Image: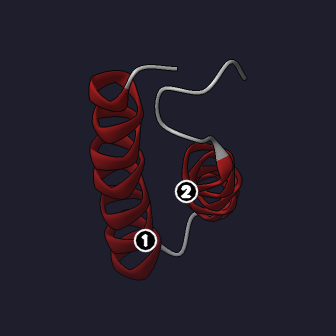
């Protein structure tokens, strides 16, 4: 994965996490909580990928 793709994924994941967490705090909706947890999973993936590696 290219460094640009990895950084884009990290930024989008962070945005999704922040928005989902904010939405959960505002509404208490369990779906927003599921999206926040999924965002953490995506975050782990993008942080674990070596930039420029053949992953």
* Nearer to us in this view, 22 or 39: 39
Residue drawn where x is 57% and y is 61% of the image: 36
Q: Mark 2 points at which residue?
A: 32
Quadrant occupied by the C terminus: top right
Residue annotated with mark 1: 21
Residue 47: image x %, image y %? 56, 55
User: Position of 34 compared to 4: left or right?
Assistant: right
Residue 49 shown left or right of residue 4 in the figure: right
Q: Nearer the viewer, residue 18 or 23?
A: 18
Residue 41, given in percent of the width and then of the height, sits at 71, 53
| Helix, strand or loop status at disc 2 | helix
- What residue is drawn where x is 47% and y is 71%? 24
Q: Mark 1–mark 2 contact, CB under 8 Å?
A: yes
The total of numbered circles placed on residues is 2
Q: Residues within 10 Å of mark 2 (few under 14, many from 20)?
A: many
Query: How far across and how far down the image is residue 15, in percent?
Result: 28, 52
Residue 19: quarter of image: bottom left
The secondary element bearing badge 1 is classed as helix
């Amino acid at each position: 994965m290219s460094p640009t793709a990895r950084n884009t994924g990290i930024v989008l994941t962070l945005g999704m996490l922040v928005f989902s967490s904010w939405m959960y705090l505002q509404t208490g909706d369990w779906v927003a909580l599921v999206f926040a947890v999924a965002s953490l999973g995506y975050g782990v993936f993008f942080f674990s990928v070596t930039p420029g590696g053949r992953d």
